[in-house]
Image (tube, rainbow, N blue to C red):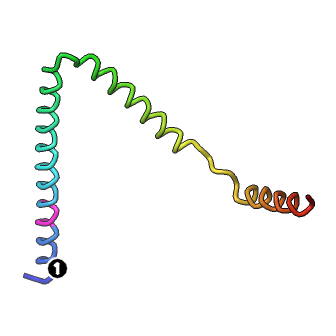
Amino acid sequence: MTREAGRREGLDEQALLLVAGLADLAVSTLGSAVGTVRGLLRRSDAAELAAQAEQDLVARGRLALDRCAAVPPAHLEVLARHAQARRSAVDD
């Protein structure tokens, strides 16, 4: 067996272990989420919780879009405003 063949088998094994670990994490997370949902459905204020969750998701979405859509001011524009403010302060 050559050195490259051993290395390739090691990479294959590592990739397989990584995928198996991710699958196990996904299954355990899904199981936990299902348990949480079952607990929430048993509550008497489930409708209220759902409304609050919807409001929270809308607020998160708005914040995420604002964060992505907000364009910072141009660097030269900021410098020009600082220079203008200094000139105004000196002239006064």
Compared with 28, 10 (above or below) is below
Read off the residue under disc 1: 4
- Which residue lies at the image location 18% right of the left edge and 16% below the top edge? 44
Which of the two residues, 28 or 37, is positioned nearer the viewer here? 37
Which of the two residues, 48 or 24, is positioned nearer the viewer here? 48
Residue 46 is drawn in which quadrant? top left
- Which residue lies at the image location 84% right of the left edge and 58% below the top edge? 84
- Which residue lies at the image location 13% right of the left edge and 55% below the top edge? 21
72 left or right, relative to 67: right
Residue 73 picture location, percent across and down: 68, 51
8 in magenta: no
15 in magenta: yes
Residue 61 picture location, percent across and down: 44, 34
69 left or right, relative to 75: left
Compared with 57, 78 (above or below) is below
Classify 10 Å Cα crowding around label 1: few (below 14), some (14-19), many (20 and above). Answer: few
Residue 15 picture location, percent across and down: 16, 62
In which quadrant will I find the C terminus?
A: bottom right
Residue that protrudes farthest toward the front in the picture: 92
Which of the two residues, 41 or 12, is positioned nearer the viewer here? 41
Which of the two residues, 92 or 65, is positioned nearer the viewer here? 92
Residue 7 picture location, percent across and down: 15, 76
Q: Amino acid at mark 1?
A: Glu
In which quadrant will I find the N terminus?
A: bottom left
- Which residue lies at the image location 15% right of the left edge and 55% below the top edge? 19
Residue 47 is drawn in which quadrant? top left
- Secondary structure under tag 1 reads helix
Residue range of the region highlighted in magenta in the rendering: 12-16
